[in-house]
Amino acid sequence: WHHQAHVVAVIRAALHEAYPDDPKPQRHLSAIAFTLGPGMGGPLKSCAVAARSLALLWNLPLVAVNHCIAHIEMGRVATSASDPVVLYVSGGNTQVIAYSDGRYRIFGETIDIAVGNCLDRFARVVGLSNDPSPGYNIELEARKHSKETPLKFIELPYVVKGMDVSFSGLLTYIEDLTRKKGFVKDGEVENDQQFTTADLCYSLQETIFAMLIEITERTMAHCGQNSVLIVGGVGCNKRLQNMMADMVADRGGTLCAMDHRYCIDNGAMIAQAGMFGLQFGSEDMLVKMEDTECRQRFRTDQVEVVWRPKTRGKHA
């Protein structure tokens, strides 16, 4: 309902900002790009209906965009990264990706819940605010750790299975810790057996980020790449960026990271990927009206990336 209530006003505002002196700004448009998937059904459907309506109203082609690929292409443009290993971390996705032979190949991923979902659910358990986001408030709690006032590191399940990771068991384990007598939700600890919300946030971040960096490094080694691009909402986390930067520097590479403007979901990334699909005539993305049914399950490697050279690397 939120998307339906605001989509018309947002479209009008965007057109006015882009072409403030033109009473018919739609004449400057070449196509309507929209998210085909993956994602939650309600928002996807609401935006697809708006896209279809505009395409019919203005007689413009529709460009169906894969949400994950949009994150990658926005990151490549924003950081000038040409061919990085990509760590895509958000509330709904956790993937390590590299380009090969015309597609973005998934080398590792979560086998259950996404990393952002794990963080958000734990934030609710310990009563952290949703403002501006649960994951950011976990990060703020974990930042209380310093050399002068170190937080307690609590060993948590570290679950890496081959190139994949798992967070559901880790989440259950840390949720159980909040029901232990030693947990102090607010206030100071009185003995070494007790631990605080900040201790748990710090331990959770260190553990899950180490898991992600391990599978990212393996992908770098396998693909022979020396740069990493972090995309998705969790990619805003400074601790994740710093840990990844340390690993990449040890390998003589570079980290391509962004701030919240381009890490979190945004319309510009859909437009960017849509522009590539339109310019290069992507058969996967230039769709007919009857083929615009949303796909809640739409994997990154299902789209042919026609705007990049179709060369086969040693990791193909």
Image: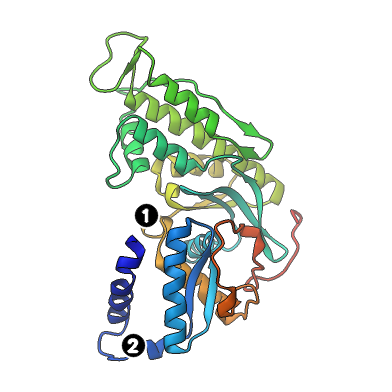
| Quarter of image, res 120 | top left
Q: What residue type is labelled 1?
A: His
Q: In which quarter of the image is the C terminus?
A: bottom right
Image position, residue 89 (x, y; %): 50, 48
- Name the quadrant of the N terminus: bottom left
The residue positioned 43% from the left and 68% from the top of the image is 47
Q: Name the residue under label 1.
A: 260
**Mark 1 or mark 2, earlier in chain:** 2
Q: Which residue lies furthest to the left in this view?
A: 187
Where on the picture, by quarter, is residue 104? bottom right
Question: Looking at the image, what colour scheme do you see?
Answer: rainbow
Q: In this view, does 97 lie to the left or right of 7?
A: right
Q: Which of 118 and 101 is in front in this view?
A: 118
Residue 73 position in % (x across, y down): 53, 65
**On the image, numbered disc 2 is attached to which residue?**
25
In the picture shown, does residue 85 fall above or below 109?
below
Q: Label 2 crowding class (10 Å Cα cut-off): few <14, some 14-19, many 20+?
A: some
